[in-house]
Image: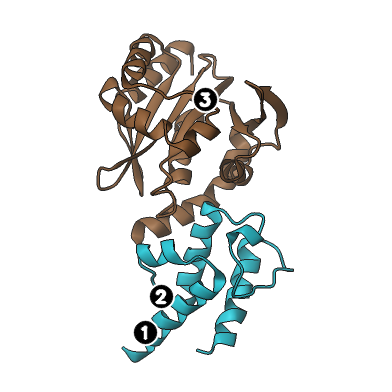
Chain colours: A cyan, B brown
Amino acid sequence: MTKEEIMNRLTEIYREVFDDASISLSEEMTADDIEDWDSLTHLRLIMQIEQQFQIKFTTGQIKNMDNVGALMEQIQILTDKKQGE
Amino acid sequence: MDREERKNKITHFRKETIIGKCVDLKPATALQAEQIVRLRNKPRNRYYFNQDYELETEGQKAWFETYEKRDDDIYWCVYRKDGLFIGTIRLYGIDLDGEYCEEGSYAIDEDYADEAPYAVESKMLVLDVAFDELQIKTMINDNRADNKVMNNIDNQLGFDKGEKIQIRGVDYLHRILKAGDYRKNRAKFSSLVDYWSRR
């Protein structure tokens, strides 16, 4: 899966979770950049991402994903790993 | 439900553990005073509880002596499924005629809050007790106005926007949740809790 594909799918997920069609993601974006991004919406995001990409993050990965770029990187690693299985 | 039946239910819930999917709520007693004090004295919790002093275990134990004498109050400790203490939550000022009660003493340890929906499940378990078991019509919750996480959860659970009030010189939102509004919003959180409990 390319970076662009991951970004496009992530953008759709963010728009759905935050109910905001105007959201445009960047790799540097953090929770501070979106008004309603708190621990609860973070858990909803993780749930949607895991379901849509059919992957599972570890607790450590969830805690260490500080921005969208780090999240994309973890998605890339896990989807690549899944394809290699 | 009459006053006596509601009183009996309160007595029952003060002794009964509530089993959730990600957390369990165990009745709080003086035996947990030390853990409660440690949690409430964390800087973030002191800020949101608007508590400008350090609590002490002996003081918390004394509080439990008065708690044991009341019958309009249910206090729980929140435990992760592996038995780790992670928080507290309480229903108080329970009207025996079933019109209203308040929710408070709510804190989930910030070290664990991001792991799973512990905060929202704890709150839902308590709201279920209030609305389904005690058949309370209206829940009252006063949150600090700048408590973004708590106010966001309350928005999504169906609390009204709230009226701004001042408590000890700090802005709070005095918020109301009607049983019907809670039931309309409950499902979206149930699926989140279900998902995380299966992970």
Quarter assignment of residue B107: top left
* Cα–Cα gap, marks 1 and 3: 51 Å
Q: Secondary structure at mark 3?
A: loop
Residue A28: x and y, percent? 60, 72
Q: Which quadrant would the C terminus of chain B be assigned to in this image?
A: bottom left
Q: Which residue is mark 3?
A: B52
Amino acid type at circle 1 is: Lys
Number of other residues with Cα within 10 Å of mark 2, as a class: few under 14, some 14 to 19, many 20 or more: some
Q: Nearer the viewer, residue B14 or B86?
A: B86
Does B154 sit above or below residue B61?
A: below
* Cα–Cα gap, marks 2 and 1: 8 Å
Horizontal side of A60 relative to A9 (left or right) equals left
Say if mark 2 contacts mark 1, CB within 8 Å: yes
Q: Earlier in the sequence, mark 2 or mark 1?
A: 2
Amino acid type at circle 2 is: Ile
Q: What residue is drawn where x is 47% and y is 23%?
A: B53
Q: Which residue is mark 1?
A: A82
Q: Secondary structure at mark 1?
A: helix
Residue B172: x and y, percent? 65, 30
Residue B11: x and y, percent? 35, 18
Chain ID at mark 1: A
Chain ID at mark 2: A
Horizontal side of B198 relative to A29 (left or right) equals left
Q: Which residue is mark 2?
A: A55
Disc 2 and disc 1 on one polypeptide chain: yes
